[in-house]
Amino acid sequence: MNKKIYVSLLGLALVLTSHSVEAKMTKEAHAMYQEACSYEYKGDFSSAINIIQKALNINGDDAMLYTKIAGLYADTGKYEEALGAYKKALKIRPNDAFVYISIGNILQTMGDYENAYNSFMQAKEIYPEYKYNYLNIANIEYQRKNYKNAIEYYTTFLNAYPEHKEAGENLANVYYASGNAEKACELYSMIYKKYPSAFKDYANYGMALFDTKQYKPASEMLTKALEDNADNEAIIAKLALSYQNLGENEKALEKFQKVFELNPKLVALKFDYANLLGNMGKYSDAIEQYKAYIQEFPNDADAYKNLGLVYKNMKDYELALFNLEKSYSKNPADQETKKELALCYHQTQDYVKALKYYNLALANDPENYELLANKALTLHAMSNYVTAIELYKQILDKHPNDRLKQNLAAANIAYGFDLYDKQDYGQAILYFEDAIDLNDKEASAYFGYAKANEKLGCIEVAKENYLKAAELAPDNTEYKTALTAFMNSNNIETAKLNASSKPQSTDVSASDLIKKGDEAYKLRKYDEALDFYTKAVVYSPNDQNTMLKIANTYKLMGNNTKALTFYDRLLSLNSSNSDAYFNKGLVLAAQKNFDDAIKCFERVIQLSPQYPYAYYSLGMAYEQKGDTSKALEYYYLYSGLESDETMQTEIKKKIKTLEG
């Protein structure tokens, strides 16, 4: 790397005379100087030194003789003697830049970088036009790790000598050493293309390529680097990692084994080695390497996490959870660890802990489909059917998926039977209906629907669905037994039933049920009201008023999903029902779905232009969206329709506030 200049040659000495006082060498001394040069040429430095010493005894005030003997001392490794001679030369010629350069090179060779730098800088001050000294300064700054200065001086030198390969390589090395691997790669690439046969810095080039994630060319350069240094641990390790990142696992394994054969104490590398072994399915070996690594680095959360994942792949969930929990305790922010903990606890049916970690993971990634789906499955498994059903629906709205749809159907069926066991037959029917809509091939949905209808006295509906369940699952003895019992208890074989789904005889009518529902509603006993209303709808499936009451009751209870379901059912029967549109709009607005809410309120105005609260609600929706202009437009329209003085006062205040 270092360009050393020891002033000893006559040609250089002649250059020096243009920057200093003329030498005063006697004829005899000059003859000795020529003789010493002859010995130097033959490589007989000892004789050359002896002759120059004799010349100095004759002519001790000549700077050229001191620079000559200094150069000879330097060539024979007698650096202290060389420095002494150069200093004597400087006393005679104190402004000789090249003597300072030679002193700097000797000091640099001796490892005295600080004084070497000072000497080079002195030369620069005397003779700034000499560009090769900038290379000396750059080299010394590189060794002193003053990378910013090194880059500046290398660049200055290369501007003068752009084809200088050594300086170009050194500049690339400085960029790499200073952490700018991209710039280093750029320079290495240029030099390699220019001098492919002379290029030698394969190791650093390969390292820089690795650091910039260019693993394929990195592996090629590092392989070349090994040709001249087959046992270099750092190169072999980086080559192993390059192959690992390329997915060339067998090659990576070979290099890892080689580097550990050379140095078994490279514990830090065992983490990557363990990762490779784990990916190759060599679980026992991977575990051994992770443990060795953890013993040296006990606070590395990733090591515990990856060890936990190996145990998970081995289906040893106890040890998987132990290590994943250890990882989480050291790095609770790691998203993958939370996700894996949730999945492992889910697998071991510890649903409470699984739910905890699903929630923690979703806090950072609330739209993650996989996490949401698994959380829904966990809630389902915990028999938290209502929340599971709501979550399944939210996911399906954005990510239609047949498997998830079947899970939603299963949750509806499970909750339907749960309600049936609680003798809430009307509500059970609704969930069985939803399940049938989702999966019309699921026998258990028809079976539950039949049982609930039988309890409400809807014999014909029950019969049809018992038969449907038995048809879909002919080998199910429970369905056969229930169908037989139902047929016998209702004398189906001998009695003819009306085609209507209403019971032939009943102690109550639909109007009685609605009346009881209204009474419960007035007392704010909404659960009771719903029970009566849903039973009434069984008798009168197309009763729009009762359906609207059911939807409104769900809205009051905060069950927006069910409310929307019944508003939509009602609108499928009567697309001109402005009350259904209005209330549906309110639910959507409560869910902050302002765009769809606005469509509902606009539909109300189309159907009933004198419906004042539709205008007010439109104003509110636009205000929430931040559209002040549209909000004011509808508030003014509402003001023109509203007769209530209190509301007039309120709307005027709102308009004044928005207008500023």
Image (tube, rainbow, N blue to C red):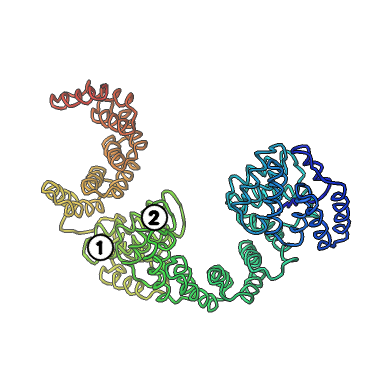
Q: Distance between the residues labelled 2 and 1?
A: 19 Å
Q: Which amino acid does label 2 sit on?
A: Asp
| Residue 589 appearing in the image | yes
Residue 599 place in picture, x, y as percent:
36, 34
| Residue 439 appearing in the image | no
Residue 25 place in picture, x, y as percent:
82, 45
**Image-quadrant location for residue 482:** bottom left
Asked which secondary structure carries label 2, the reply is helix
- Check contact, mark 2 vs mark 1: CB within 8 A: no
Q: Which of marks 2 and 1 is nearer the N terminus?
A: 1
Q: Where is 240 relative to 198, above or below?
A: below
Q: Nearer the viewer, mark 2 or mark 1?
A: 1
Quick check: 631 left or right of 277?
left
User: In this view of the protein, which residue sits in the foreground, 487 or 9?
Assistant: 9
Q: Residue at x 13, y 26 (%)?
A: 646
Q: Which amino acid does label 1 sit on?
A: Leu
Residue 215 place in picture, x, y as percent:
65, 58
Residue at which label 1 appears:
419
Q: Residue at x 71, y 56 (%)?
A: 82
Q: Which residue is drawn at 69% across and 40% down?
A: 95
User: In this view of the protein, which residue sits in the foreground, 63 or 359?
Assistant: 63
Quick check: 130 left or right of 45?
left
